[in-house]
Image: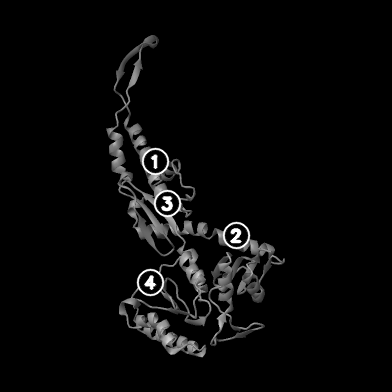
């Protein structure tokens, strides 16, 4: 299975060889309904086979095209994989299988483009952010999304006990005692007091953590959320060299939380940082909605996307507009027919490939409450 990312979706969108088959459906791992899932996939494959025959594709070519999906039908371990949604994309030289954390309505589309619109709505949930969780027990750097977490290795040198040992072994400076009239007396060995040594130890520790984090996330622009006991954040921020440190920390003893608990506690901080671009695009649309810099007309958006005029687009991830696209007219159908395309998906793919920002959301969350809207470059 392929990991979902902007790059993986773009690779599917850019694929040129056809015809292309998109199969989307809900799945139920760990439930008694999991027995229904292979049957549902068989039904989708039967529909795809009929559409391909209607388009004149030869039976041997259909068998070769659909075989990667047919092999999953009787694979028991495949149906127990995590995820609530399944998306399979098939072309002559391409197979992509995605298990997704959301339900997907059953969809079969055979056309010149893959049906990727529902996946676009997941991209923000799959956007990465980092969590830094230092404690005297361990220093953890986590790479997180809304639904997943994994550790990023850090060098052993950031461990608190290694820094503490280094500081304790450092020779202590000796202060001179000045006698009457400024006469210089013998040096006395008062050195650092306990609190001075502790402060120095913390400064060295946070400095070492910052160096390690900057090396580990070099070149990234993802938010970094800090988790630590009261006072740790300000100490770390004084040394921080990563420009995307979130201003709001989570003040808790990090050692008491698992990796998954850290992800759950930090998502509410990371989410608005990850969706900031979408919010700005929505505000921009509302500001220009009554001008020629914006439109909610699907045909106009299709034409604008075809010529690279779309700057940002909002599209309903949970609805379709099926149609046969001819050279002179567009015939819209309530239910998909052979050679139909979802015009909402068509517009989203063309806009994406022209460099537009595409936000696929539930219809009720779109800025205009319609199925599609866009701001235009010109």
Is there CB contact under 8 Å for labels 4 and 3? Answer: no
Q: Which residue is the site of mark 1?
A: 207
- Which quadrant is the C terminus positioned in? bottom right
Determine whether 57 is above or below 99 in the image: below
Give the residue displayed 35% in from the left and 76% down from the top. Answer: 29
Where does the image place residue 149, in percent across and percent down from the top left? 38, 60
Indicate which disc residue 280 carries: 2
Q: Are marks 4 and 2 in contact (CB under 8 Å)?
A: no
Q: Could you say where residue 145 lies in the image, as x and y percent from the top left?
A: 43, 61
| Cα gap from disc 1 to disc 4, whole angstroms | 40 Å
- Could you tell which of marks 2 and 1 lies nearer the N-terminus? 1
Nearer to us in this view, 297 or 187:
297
How far is mark 4 from mark 2, CA to CA? 34 Å
Q: CA distance from mark 2 to mark 1?
A: 35 Å
* Drawn side of residue 275 relative to residue 378, left or right: left
Indicate the colouring scheme.
Answer: one colour
Extreme residue in the right direction: 291
For residue 70, which quarter of the picture? bottom left
Residues tagged 1 and 4 counted as in contact (Cβ below 8 A):
no
Element carrying mark 4: loop
- At mark 2, the secondary structure is helix
Local crowd at mark 2 within 10 Å, few (<14), some, or many (≥20)?
few
* Residue wearing tag 4: 1
What number is the disc on residue 217? 3
Residue 375 in sight in this render: yes
215 is higher (above) or lower (below) than 199: below
N-terminal of the pair, mark 4 or mark 3, is 4
Does 91 sit left or right of 356 as displayed?
left
């Amino acid at each position: 299975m392929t990991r979902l990312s902007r790059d993986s979706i773009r690779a599917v969108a850019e694929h040129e060889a056809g015809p292309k088959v998109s199969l989307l459906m809900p799945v139920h791992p760990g439930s008694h309904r999991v027995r229904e899932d292979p049957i549902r996939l068989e039904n989708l494959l039967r529909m795809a086979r009929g559409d391909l025959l209607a388009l004149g594709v030869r039976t041997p070519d259909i068998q070769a095209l659909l075989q990667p999906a047919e092999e999953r039908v009787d694979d028991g371990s495949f149906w127990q994989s995590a995820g609530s949604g399944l998306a399979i994309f098939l072309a002559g030289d391409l197979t992509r299988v995605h298990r997704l954390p959301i339900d997907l309505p059953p969809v079969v589309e055979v056309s010149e483009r893959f049906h990727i619109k529902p996946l676009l709505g997941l991209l923000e949930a799959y956007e990465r952010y980092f969590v830094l969780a230092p404690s005297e027990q361990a220093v953890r750097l986590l790479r997180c999304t809304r639904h997943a977490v994994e550790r990023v290795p850090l060098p052993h040198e950031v461990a608190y006990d290694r820094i503490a040992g280094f500081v304790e072994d450092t020779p202590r400076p000796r202060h001179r005692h000045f006698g009457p009239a400024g006469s210089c007396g013998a040096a006395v060995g008062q050195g650092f007091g306990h609190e001075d040594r502790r402060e120095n130890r913390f400064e060295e520790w946070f400095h070492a953590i910052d160096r390690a984090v900057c090396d580990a996330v070099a070149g990234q622009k993802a938010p970094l959320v800090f988790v630590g006991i009261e006072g740790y954040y300000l100490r770390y921020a004084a040394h921080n060299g990563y420009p995307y440190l979130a201003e709001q920390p989570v003040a808790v003893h990090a050692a008491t939380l698992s990796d998954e608990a850290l992800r759950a506690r930090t998502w509410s901080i990371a989410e608005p940082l990850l969706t900031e671009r979408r919010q700005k695009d929505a505000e921009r649309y509302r500001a220009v909605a009554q001008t020629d810099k914006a439109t909610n007309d699907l045909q106009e958006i299709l034409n604008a996307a075809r010529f690279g005029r779309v700057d940002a687009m909002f599209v309903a991830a949970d609805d379709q507009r099926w149609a046969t696209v001819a050279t002179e007219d567009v015939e819209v159908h309530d239910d998909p027919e052979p050679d139909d395309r979802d015009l909402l998906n068509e517009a989203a793919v063309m806009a994406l490939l022209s460099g537009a920002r595409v936000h696929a959301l539930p219809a009720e969350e779109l800025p205009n409450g319609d199925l599609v809207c866009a701001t235009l470059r010109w």
